[in-house]
Image: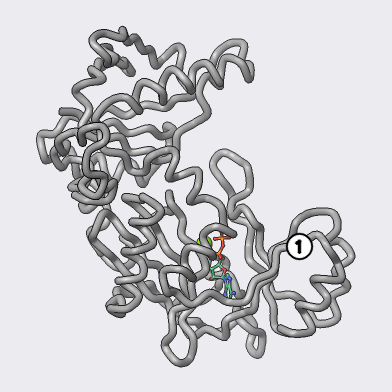
């Protein structure tokens, strides 16, 4: 049974996992939906209630029924590399590809429905709080006055995009920034703005979850680039030379995160937390397709290995329709 990886051509993270899968004897097919139709082709006939057919890419053929897992890593938009791209062809190709994949018994990392829901930050904060994780006070608004009132109650704020990444291929990070005192906030009227109480943190935490395996890493807040200047608030832009180091996940946090993943039906999630002076981990977000290469390289935590193991695990028996849903958990291995 084959592992299918949907991702763009240049994806070092996928390379790391493919390298781990190579030694296992489990066949792997990697393709970019952007190449469908063309470099990627598909055919499936609806017979006896299921699609029998195959996908082909790079001269390799994989039968739909022979898929054990699908890793939706960083796929391109279907049909964007054809001679005459159109929104219509993209939709047709997406429906054909993902529609057929949905009807196989393959396990998903992550299922497209779960992934779509999990990208919404407001929903993330809601779920995190429900699962018992502390969430900093947050306001999303287009009302300048609401922003001013919020800033009066929480004078030390950060601003960050509601959606996370910039719509670009590959996605570009938009830094979280501190809000200067006396900010006027009139521009809030031009686009929804996410303001959040700044956690006076002593470290950033990245907790990468693969099925039920957790890898937590901690990066202590360092000094700013110039003496006397505070460090950048966004860990991705910090000049600090403090390394990412492995750290234990507190038991209560681990229990909450397990609840979060189960509720969100995610097989993979990379959580960002800010650790305050009391050691409390404040939930910032959960990236359902977050990078893990940078953590693995610095901490030597075997995350790619864990992803490969998850993808290579056998397909569970199909749950009967109308059967016991509790046995059909997406995250169970
Ligand atoms: N409220 C906050 N207090 C302190 N640091 C924050 C806060 N919010 C974000 N950060 C920093 O900015 C980084 C990016 O913010 P995050 O919430 O993860 O959004 P995204 O990664 O989607 O832009 C975090 O990893 C953290 O280093
Ligand atoms: Mg983040």
221 or 53, nearer to the observer: 53
Horizontal relation, residue 125 to residue 155: left or right: left
Quarter where residue 190 is shown: bottom right
Percent across and percent down for residue 249 are 30, 76
Q: Which residue is mark 1?
A: 141
Position of residue 283 measured from the top left corner of the image (x, y, whole percent) = 48, 71
Which residue sits at x=81%, y=78%? Answer: 149
The residue drawn where x is 26% and y is 54% is: 211
Q: Determine the secondary structure under disc 1.
A: strand
Above or below 26: residue 81:
above
Task: Describe residue 35's horizontal placement relative to residue 238 as left or right.
Answer: left
- Image spot of residue 258 (x, y percent): 31, 64
Packing grade of label 1 (10 A; few <14, some 14-19, many >=20) is: some
Q: Is mark 1 within 8 Å of ligand 1?
A: no
Instruction: Out of 167 and 19, give the one closest to the viewer.
Output: 167
Instruction: Report the number of discs.
Output: 1
x and y percentages locating residue 281 in the rendered image: 44, 79
Q: Furthest residue to the front?
A: 322
Which residue is drawn at the image coordinates 41% and 26% (left, top)?
98
Relative side of 113 to 59, left or right: right
Q: Residue sitting at 24 percent across and 50 percent down? A: 326
Q: Is residue 229 above or below residue 253?
A: below
């Amino acid at each position: 049974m084959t592992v299918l990886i949907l991702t763009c051509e240049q994806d070092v993270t996928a390379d790391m996992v493919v390298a781990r899968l190579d030694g296992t004897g489990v066949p792997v097919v990697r393709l970019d939906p952007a190449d469908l139709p063309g470099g990627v082709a598909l055919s499936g006939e609806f017979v006896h209630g299921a699609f029998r057919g195959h996908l082909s890419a790079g001269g390799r053929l994989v039968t739909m029924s022979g898929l054990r897992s699908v890793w939706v890593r960083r796929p391109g938009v279907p049909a964007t590399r054809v001679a005459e791209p159109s929104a219509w062809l993209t939709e047709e190709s997406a429906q054909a590809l993902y529609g057929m994949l949905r009807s196989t018994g393959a396990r998903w990392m992550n299922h497209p429905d779960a992934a779509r829901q999990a990208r919404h930050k407001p929903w993330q904060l809601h779920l995190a709080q429900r699962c018992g994780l502390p969430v900093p006070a947050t306001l999303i608004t287009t009302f300048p006055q609401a922003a001013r009132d919020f800033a009066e109650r929480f004078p030390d704020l950060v601003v960050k995009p509601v959606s996370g990444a910039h719509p670009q291929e590959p996605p570009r990070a938009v830094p979280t920034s501190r809000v200067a005192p006396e900010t006027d906030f009139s521009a809030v009227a031009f686009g929804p703005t996410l303001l959040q109480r700044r956690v006076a943190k002593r470290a950033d935490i990245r907790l990468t979850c693969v099925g039920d395996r957790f890898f937590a890493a901690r990066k202590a807040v360092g000094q700013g680039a110039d003496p006397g200047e505070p460090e950048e608030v966004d860990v991705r832009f910090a000049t600090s030379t403090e390394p990412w180091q492995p750290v234990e996940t507190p038991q209560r946090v681990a229990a909450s995160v397990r609840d979060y993943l189960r509720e969100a039906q995610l097989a993979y999630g990379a959580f960002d937390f800010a650790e305050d002076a009391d050691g409390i981990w404040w939930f910032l977000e959960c990236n359902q397709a977050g990078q893990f290469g940078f953590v693995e390289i610095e901490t030597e935590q075997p995350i790619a290995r864990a992803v490969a193991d998850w993808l290579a695990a056998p397909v569970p028996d199909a749950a009967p329709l109308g059967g016991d849903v509790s046995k059909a958990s997406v995250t169970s291995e």
